[in-house]
Image (cartoon, rainbow, N blue to C red):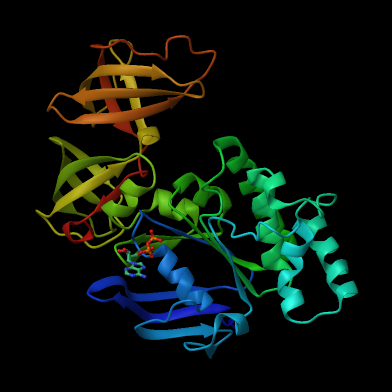
Amino acid sequence: MEQIPILELRGVSKYFGDTCALYDINLAIENGEFITLLGPSGCGKTTILRILSGFERASEGDVLLNGNKINAMPPEDRQVNTVFQNYALFPHMTVAQNVGFGLKMQKYANSRIAERVEEVLKRVHLEGLAERMPSQLSGGQQQRVAIARAIINNPLVLLLDEPFSALDFKLRKQMQLEIKHLQRQLGITFVFVTHDQEEAFAMSDRVVIMNEGSIEQIGSSQEIYEEPKNLFVARFVGEINVLEGTVTSVNSGGGLKADVEGVSFNLKARGEFTWGEKVKVLLRPEDLRIYTLPEQTLNPPFFMGRIDESVYKGATVDIMLTLDNGKQLQAAEFFNEDDEDIVYRPGERVQVTWVEGWEVVLGEEDE
Ligand code: ADP
């Protein structure tokens, strides 16, 4: 039997006056998953969270919790809690008072509140700091208090809106691991918002790529990175080379032959293509293979080009090169200590190809 999504948006649109913040959003969130909304600033991520939490109402469409319509249900009845970007801690209350606040409002007995506060502080590794004031905590600790406060009443879903934006790089990385770990332990569904691709990939079971109020693609980090559905997704997650091509033949088996930047290649194609169609061939920098002349002479097809620059980055060497037709490409090779000569010299002549089958081919309508 198929599980009912814990939260679902069906045909949700949201207008603020003339501004369309969301358009026809369909999103089913599975129970227990860690799902991340990723997209540039202003694409509608926070508006989705606010509709899920009940702080905002959809202009059109339905919100379902466990299969039941909750369009008009107030936030406090939803069992959906939010961790805000600025933590929103009460400055005049101790850590314990902040964390227990929700239960106090619900008139729980003081002894029960104290017990529960202790439990959740332990969960977020803050035992011993219960009597501190928020101003006496580091950014990471304040973040944990905000999370403890949001999980104290066992919500079904936790919404996290850019929770690490105030933290420095190292702490951010550490908190990412902690939150992922916590989510696994608790088994609660987490809906996370970020504009940081690495953060999204590191934490999520599924990533939702958003752009201008619409969903562009939903998938695992690997699917999004390796099989982007369009140029927006491809460009938003990591570096990408976009080569121009024209289909010269279509095989019955699904493969294509195309003239790519003036050279004929066989391509792996997923969609339907027709003879003469213009295509874009997408290649990640690490998909490219570079061979220096004269040591290597590849069998065709390959491009001829010239190294512009090669930069040692520790784990990788980043390479900028220009093909003979003027097209500029970025490549990346993993640095191998046995290979002394991996840093190329500017001006060096090279043969360029890619790992067969790693290309993504988009037709004109996928742009
Ligand atoms: P994100 O979280 O991805 O940065 P938001 O959901 O905050 O994006 O915003 C989406 C769009 O809706 C933006 O154009 C924003 O200006 C607009 N918007 C959001 N909230 C309001 C509001 N209360 N009033 C008017 N416009 C809003």
Q: Residue furthest left?
A: 276
Q: Residue at x 55, y 87 (%)?
A: 67
Q: Nearer the viewer, residue 200 or 124?
A: 124
Q: Which residue is drawn at 59% across and 60% down?
A: 88
Question: Residue 130: where, in percent of width, then height?
Answer: 81, 55
Write down the quadrant of residue 4 in the picture: bottom right
Q: Residue at x 69, y 51 (%)?
A: 134
Question: Residue 323: where, in percent of width, then height?
Answer: 19, 26
| 286 left or right of 21 in image | right
Q: Which of 349 and 176 is in front in this view?
A: 176
Is 149 above or below relative to 360?
A: below
Q: Which residue lies furthest to the right in this view?
A: 111
Q: Nearer the viewer, residue 187 or 13?
A: 13
Is 286 above or below relative to 65?
A: above
| 97 left or right of 158 in image | right
Query: Residue 178: in sight, yes or no?
Result: no
Write down the quadrant of residue 47 in the picture: bottom left
- Indicate the quadrant of ligand 1 in the picture: bottom left
Q: Which residue is drawn at 23% across and 11% down?
A: 347
Is 240 above or below relative to 349?
A: below
Question: Residue 96: where, in percent of width, then height?
Answer: 79, 60
**Quarter in which the C terminus is drawn:** bottom left
